[in-house]
Image: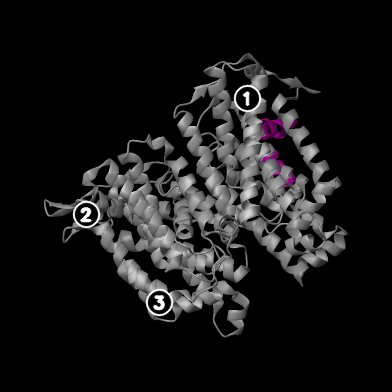
Amino acid sequence: MRRLLWPVVVLVLLLALNVFFSPGFFSIQVRDGHLYGSLIDILRFGAPLILVSLGMTLVIATGGIDLSVGSVVAISGALACLQISQGASLFTAVALALGLSLVLGAWNGFLVAGIGIQPIIATLILMVAGRGLAQLITDGQIITVNSPAYKVIGGGYWLTVPFGILIVLAVLAVTAFLTRRLALGMLIESVGGNAEASRLAGIRARGIIIMVYAFAALCAGVAGLMISSNVSSADGNNAGLWIELDAILAVVIGGTALSGGRFSLGGTVLGALIIQTLTTTIYSIGVPPETTLLFKALVVTAVCLIQSPSFRAKALRRRGRAAVPGPASEEKVRVSL
Amino acid sequence: MSTLTLGGRTAVPAKYLPVLVTGCLFVAMFAVGGFRYEGFASGQVILNVFIDNAFLLVVAVGMTFVILTGGIDLSVGSVVALSTMISASLMEGPGWPPYLVIPLVLAIGSGLGLVMGYIVHAFDIQPFIVTLAGMFLARGLCYTIGTDSIPIRDPTFTAFAQTRIDLFADLWISPSVVIAVVVVVVAAYVLHYTRFGRSVYAAGGSEQSALLMGLPVGRTKITVYTVSGFCSALGGVLLSFYMLSGYGLHAAGMELDAIAAVVIGGTLLTGGSGFLFGTVLGVLVLGLIQTIIIFEGTLLSWWTKIFIGMLLFVFILLQRLFSARSRR
């Protein structure tokens, strides 16, 4: 619980700042059978980031990192739009895009677990080459599609709720169930804590690692579909640019250590929401949008410093708290979300 | 095992092998280019690679220091952009003279590096995250100064941009290349022949052992980020000579090029092993890929990225073989 204290405080402060500048910030209305409101917008525009961050959380929990998600976002959107523009059915397009994402993720996982390359570097390959691949698919153009069915994924509504939010909720629920109700989460954490020891303990570390990278790429693929469907076009060059950095930030702000061995899904969702709220806040309080990055830098530095045990030891003259078993306490927080 | 016999047969110490492979690759690429394209096999093509990548070379030198200690610096591209932006805006707006602007820019870059290095060392936060924040900060500062491209019309800068230093036989280089070469030579001396250089290798090889040996690991780490910040700022100055403008979008994604150059140059990303000369070769290989793609004509720009990705893959596989062997 205490691990999530600071992210919650930051998020609440940000939201309070918004109310201060625009009093109607918390109001949510139903218009034309759709939910409207600033909070809904934060969720809707933050949905791709939350998805990518969820995948990233599991990768980071194994002590890895995935820099290639931004490229996978671009590739998945590009392939889906290309298929639809060539007359393929929605199902084929989505299945192909997600299938390719899975393959790319498995490739990352293979490099990390099979060959034993450092994760930053292994995924750097796909990050660099993947942008090229996405542009190859779109032939350097921006592919625009006109498919109402495809538009639903990122811009549509179902039962008054934006469809993107529903996808995020579904993925979050499945992930939370798999990792916190089944043993999978513990296996992932043990691989992150010490891959060799967990292998000796009889865990198939290799399979777990390949699986988390594939999952991260799948999440990125879904996010890519959302982003491209929201604007009904695929841009190989700019879709998902820097989303990997935002996702890593979200994970770190959420209290998952980059060294692996422990993760918090609730924290990650909070982290992603903080980043999205920050962007919205900057628009709503009238700060020039150019300074978004500046604010992001300040918030990141602040959150990282607050979470750094040695900073707290120096600033508060007190040792970092002892390790408490996390999963049980996170469970409550996540449910209350 | 095959690399072991290779190393034994050719009597090259294993630590030079990655650099050697990169060197061979460079020669092979140049030879293939020379056979395929008319006018490729000239000295000027290589010199042009230097001229077009002088700033990348300087930035990659700084990155080599950081990676040798086992860290990483993601902020370099943004610091380059920030340097072009600050110099352009100060010279165009208040009309500051270059001899004030350039030292100021270098001081700002070094200062940013110093702060990041201090945070990395003092608060034990991963370099990845700290320099990521630095990257956002520098880019954000760029956009705060201005979102448009600012032209540079200062006579000193234009002189630097247009001067051609003639070498023998119709070959020429730009003043930026001279600066870059000086940086490389100084950095190579510092890295391979001074106490600080040895601390860099020691801290990257094993921080624990370096500490136990009584080496100033903290100071070394802070210094390498400062060096990297300085090199990025200098790279930014060279880029503003080259582009004659300051723009917040300059050098987007350059940190990846710099990291790729260092990796292709045979420096281990885990730290402790690598050579500055390898980084020079790495930059040359990246530059030559672009040249070949320009000469090919039909190949489109995104193939550059795919090729660089494939090269990275090959070199990382090689690294993996080397490090796996040395561990056994």
Q: Is residue B117 visible?
A: yes
Distance from the alpha carbon under mark 1 to that under mark 2: 49 Å
Distance from the alpha carbon under mark 2 to that under mark 3: 31 Å
Amino acid identity at mark 2: Gly
| Residue at image point 58% right, 56% down | A311
Give the magenta part as a residue range: B27-54
Same chain check for tags 3 and 1 = no
Question: Overall secondary structure of the magenta stretch?
Answer: helix
Q: Quadrant of the C terminus of chain A?
A: bottom left
Amino acid identity at mark 1: Phe
Residue at the spot of label 1: B241
Q: Residues within 10 Å of mark 2 (few under 14, many from 20)?
A: some
Q: Would residue A239 appear left or right of A33 to someone viewing this image?
A: right
Q: Would residue B251 appear left or right of B226 to someone viewing this image?
A: left
Residue at the spot of label 2: A156
Residue at the spot of label 3: A180
Q: Residue furthest bottom?
A: A202
